[in-house]
Every structure is written in structure tokens, then in C-alpha cells.
Image (tube, coloured by chain):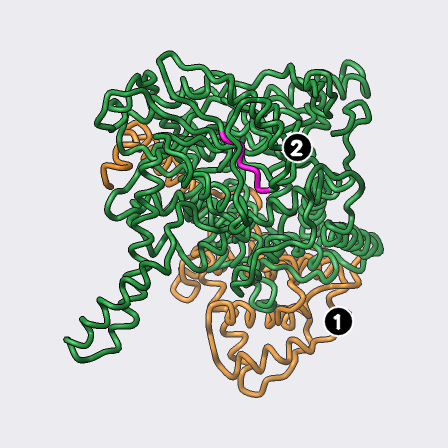
Amino acid sequence: MDTARKTWYFTPFEGREPPPPSGHSRWRETLWQVLATLSIVLGLWYLHWRWTESLNLGALWFSLPLTLAETLAFVGLALFVFNLWQIADTPRRPPPRFHSECGGEVDRPLAVDIFVATYSEDPELVRISLEAAKALRYPHPIDIKVHCLDDGRRDAMREVAEDVGVNYVVRTDNVGFKAGNLRNAIGVTSGDILVICDADTRLFPQFLEETLGYFRDPDVAWVQTPQWFYDLPEGERLDRVWGRRFGPPGKWAANGLQALVGEIRKGSDPFDNGATFFYDAIQRRRNGANASFCCGAGSIHRRDAVLESAVRAYADRVNRRVDQLVNEVKDPESRQALEETVRLQYALDEEIVPYKFHVSEDIYTSIVLHGDPERPWKSVYHPGILSKMLSPQDMSSWVVQRYKYAAGTLDIALHDNPLFRYNLTASQRVMYSATIWSYLSSLWNWIFIVSPTIYLFTAIPPVSSFSLEFFKHFIPFVLSYELALVVGTWGIPNAKGRAFYMGFFPYGLRAFWTALRGKPIRFPVTPKERQTGVFLSLVRWQIALIVLIWAGIVWATIFIVLGIRADVSGYVINVLWGLYTISLLWGVVRAATWRPAATEGAR
Amino acid sequence: MSRRSSGWITARSQIAFVIGLMIAAGLIFWLEHVRFTTLRDPLGIAWLEASDPPADLGLADADVARAWADHLVARLASLDPETEQVAALLAARACPAVSDRCAPLEAAADQALESMSGDVELPDDPVAQALMIVAVEAALQHGVADAAWLDAYRLASAMPRPLSAEPGLRQFTSRAAALVGREFPVQRDFSDLRDWSAP
């Protein structure tokens, strides 16, 4: 089929250019560090006051959980600040000509395997990715092989692979899903470098040219590039929207606001899939601490690192099983005889698993490689966008994806915690802790959401007083933190990220419960491709809370107006708090009802 | 820090960290000691402080003590209605909690309470009633645990509500709340001071 003539929903977006990475101003970074330190210290001061002077001793059932939630959230904030502390990009190096320049022993061209993993995607969609991989350029002779890894074992996919002229790889089962697919591919290929692509990952021609230079450092195990979802709705600038609605005053107001906090676009990316904040801020600033982790698609791996680590993990598993058995035998001779016998058996039983069969195999593999006691590997985050891919543009896909991220990461935290295992540096432990902590936040975020409702209905304050003392401690902390964040992440939008961070709590709690029980990480909805429709059932908790908060506001307002209650300052604070919470939850609810514009066509 | 991640925190960022610490320390110091207008006089005692009370009424020169007492009397006399006088007296009792300069008032209040601690009864005088409440609250707030105080407090808690309906008593409750650093949480023991019927 002629690909160029097929119209996809993303066809209108083909001309989009990727945004450059955010600029790095040393003075702005220094100002961010000053403000961040200020906010952390003020936060500690605020928490000290909360625990020592502001607890409502008559309502500890309310004030204690909220203060605890504030404290736990503050820990997350401190970890977040550490994560964002500074940019330290790895210096670019010229692309190597020979394998020997990357730690090899022979002066031969590099061999690169491009893995495009697919299962059920439209073969014509995969064709575009395969053709992009075929079009990679490199300034020196290089041996590039593109492999279509089809876990769906489809004839149509085979025909497309043959048509494009790439290797077609299948296996007899689907064990391990994507990780199993990649492991199988490693077994039947031999390149020095592996590039991981999803079915919709379209590499730019300069992909290898710009990234293979990092492998001149023999300790570099993998390079992660940003994932750019180019099919997201771009929305409309705020000054245009307000200018249309309110005329010149609206336009001026919008321009003023944007001058303060950066560009604001209405109607863009309802699911916060842009991931700019994650890649350009979080991942990029972990690079200096050698703690950026692999995210799958768009990553480049050194085969030696993958296999070395896998062999070491294999040997550890065999030794652990042998030790468990022989340690029960007291007699040394018998123990030695048993050990010799069972070691071979266990060695045959166990498998060498280059990619752990885990729902979060990417971050898991990163932890294992970073913390390898024999050979602690390095990672590199390359800030420039070198590929483009499609986003999960519906609520069910979004929920499944985020739920699996959360449950997978929490599963690692609860059962293989990097804080207590592996040979990680202190900075790496803090960075991984920041990731884990962010997924634990659902355990306390719901307290922030329900607190204003409790106050509005009962007039029981969680603090001793919503008085000047409260404002004196709270406002400097919050203001300094918000200001720090604006400066520190200048030009990187994250408003939607906050909404989804708070609104994610029902799925986060469910993920935690699943991981805690060690249950398989599954979700009842399993979308195969873009879904259309309204997914209100997925956001029922958010809707219920919005209704509850509104009811609380109405209830308290009636009591205040009738003069039955006189707690005006507490009322005002909690109404504002409730409205802010509603705005966050509403972002999630609105995403559940979002439908792509009719002009975008259908996949 | 190992070679794998050494040196990523630059000297410039460490200096920024120290500057941030210093600014934070200065800001906290200022906030802890700042005397906002409302903080300066949360109990309405500025006029008392301004009257320059003697350090110890018992040891003060008689003329000085009398002059100060006259000043108080004149001030109270200028207040109308009576509930405003109540509020002013309460402020006088509360004053020592926030200002050492009002220490002499504390002794006087203690003396008044001591006279009641033997056979504790609810005094008829609304001024004495209110004074007792605030004195007991202050005592509880400062960790005084004594059966006599508690009895007085219990009686004070049972004080009839009409007293708190007066405008001056709203001021009183506000000041009493400020004294103990609370804003009438429902479940605190002094919640009975709340005036639900106030317009």
C-alpha cells in the first residue's frame, strides 16, 4: 500500500518541528537554587510550627493526618528540589568511526541493531517506523540492521517488513510481553549497540550521529533521548483566546500573565502527555548525578552492558538457590557434594534474562545497571529530541499507562528497594527515591483533597487557628516555593502535570494496594489503540469529590450568611482551598470527556 | 560521592545554597520577631503598655502606683457600655502573657483568683466572671495543673450564655482566643466561649 496516500489522524501534524531543549542560564539556575533553598528552610520552619504550635489538640483525628500529609509531601518536595537542582548535560562527542573507540578491541565499523517491537498495531503504521529506521545516516561506515519484532506473528506484518527490507523476527510464545520480545531479539542478533523502538517510534535521520559519541566512554551503558509526542493538540495561545472573548483588555491581561509565567495555551494536550516536564526538567537534571533512567522507546544500549548485567543477575540467582539449599546441611563433605550436584542443575534451570519481565522493566534495568557492584554503569540523557511517536490520546489509555507506571515502580520499591539494595551512589539513591516517593504521594494527596470539605461541613479546623500566625508561617513557604519553581523551570509548562498529579490519587491508591499485596499488575481496561468516547466511569471519584466540595462550600456559605457561624477567615481559606482542588480535579474530569477534533480524522 | 556522580554539584550551586540558607535564616528571624500592628496589640493592651505601669505595684512608689491606678480608672470610666469595661479588664489580665511590662497585672489577677479558690463559686459580677475565665485559660495554657484552677474553670464553663451576647464580650472572646492562640476550634475545651448567636 502506498503509505503516503493513506490518511492517518496524525497526518496533519507531520509538518511539526520538535521544540528545542530548554535554555540553560547559569544566573537563572543560581537564582532557582537560592529560592529553592529558601523555600526548603521556610518549609522546615512551617512544619516545626505545625507540629509544635498549631495542632488542634481537640481534633487530632483531623489535624494529625493533615500535618502528617504535609510532612510527607514536604519530603517529596525536598526530593523534587534535589532532582531539579541543576542541569549538567554530558558533553557531546563526535560519532565514533570504529568499535575500538567505544571500548572494543578491533578496528571495525560499529554494528547497530534497531529493534522495532510490535504486537497488534496496524502494519502500515509500523511500516512508517521501519522506513524511518532504514533512513538513518552516519558519517562513517556503519553496519545498521533494522529488526521488526512481531509478537503478533502476522503475515501482513511480515509482508511489510519484507517490503521495506528489514529483518522480521518472531518467537513461538509471548512470554514476558515486550521485555520477552526484546530478550528474544537479543538472542538472534549480534550488534554492538541496540536501539529500542516502539511500533510508532520514528527515528530522525541524525539519531545515531548525535548519540553514538557518548559510547566513547566505555562505562556508558545506555543513552536515553526525549520522547516527543507530536500528535498532541497544540491549543491556542491565551492572549488570542482572551482577546477574542474580552477584547484588547483581555489580550493585555493575558500577555501580562504570560510575561510572568511563560506561554499558556488553552485546549492543548488534555492528558498532559507532552512529557516535556518529565524529560526536559526531571530526566535532564538527573543526568549530572548519573541517575537518568531508561524509558524504553528512543533509548540506545550497549549490548555488553545488557548482557553483562544479565549474566551477573543469573549467577546471583543460581548462587542464592544453591546457598539456600546447602546451608541446611551441617556436614562439610556432604554439603560440598550437594553443592556440586545442585549447582549444575540450578544453572540449567535458570535463564539469562537481559530484560527483567517486569511491568516497569525500564526503570528496573536502570537501577540494576547503575547499582551493579562489579561494574557500575553510567547513563546519559541526551536533551535534544531525535524521534517522534504517538501519544495515548484517550482517558482509558492514559489511565492504563499511568497505573502501570505507578504499580510497577511501587512494586520495585516494596520488593526490591533500591535504597537498600544495589551499589548506588548517595545521589542516585536520592534520585530514585524521588521517583518512588512521587508515586507514593497518592497515600497522602487525598487528605489534601478532602480536608477543605471536612472543615466547610463541620467548622472543625485542622490547625489551631487560621490566623495571622498561620499565614505568617504558611505564605512565605508557599510563595518562595512557587517562585522558585517558576524560575527553576522557566519555559517548561507543568500546570496540567500538577492537576494530574493530584487527580491521579484513586489510581495511585489502587496501584499501591496491588503492589503491596504482590498481585499481578493488571487493569480491567486494555485498549489496543486510540479509544473514542466519554470515560466518566474512570473519573467517578474525582467527580464525587468535586460535588462534595461544592456542597461543602454551599453549606458553609449558608451558615455564614445566617450568622450561625462566625469563622470567616477559616471559611475564606477553605473555600479558596476547595476551589483550587476543584480546578485540579476538573482537569482530570475534562480529559475524560475530551474528544479529538473532527478534522483530525481517524486512525 | 563516587566517581560515577562526583562533581555534579558545582561550587556555584553550593554558594547559592549558602546564600539561600542565610536569606531564610534572616527572614525567619524577622518573621519571628516582627511586630505587625495586629500582633503588636492582639489583646487591646497598647494603652496599658503606654501607661507605663510600675514594675511592681507592691514596691512601687505610692504616687507612681496611684497615678497608674488613676490612669486605669480613667480609662475604664471612659468606656461605655459596661461590657467594654469588661473587655478592657480582661485585656489587662491577658496582658502579661504577651508583655513583661504587664507583669504586675498578673499578680493582681492571681490574687483575685486565690480569693475564690477556697470555696469556689461563680461570682455574680460579670467582670469577675470573665476575669476568672481568662485567668484560668491562661493558667491552663501555661501548664498550671491545680484542682482549684480546674474547679474554677469548670464553673466558668457553666457560666450562663447571655453574658457572651454583648458586643463587648465578642471582643472579649476574640481576645481570649488570641491569648491562647486559638480561633475557637469547635472541639477545644474553651469552645463554650464561642458566641454562636452573635450577629
- Which chain is mark 2 on? A
Rendered residue at 36%/27% (across/down): A88
**A62 or A142, nearer to the observer:** A142
* Quadrant of residue A457 within the rendered picture: bottom right
- The quadrant of the rendering that contains the N terminus of chain A is top right
Q: Main secondary structure of the magenta part?
A: strand
Residue tagged 2: A156
Q: Position of residue A182 (x, y in %)?
A: 47, 41
**A99 or A381, nearer to the observer:** A99
- In the orientation shown, which residue stands out farthest toward the left? A333
Start-end of magenta stretch: A147-151
Helix, strand or loop status at disc 1 = helix
The tint of chain B in the picture is orange
Q: Position of residue A595 (x, y in %)?
A: 78, 34
In the picture, measured across the screen, residue B81 lies left or right of residue A470, that is right
Amino acid, disc 2: Ala
Few, some or many residues within 10 Å of mark 1 (<14, 14–19, 20+): some
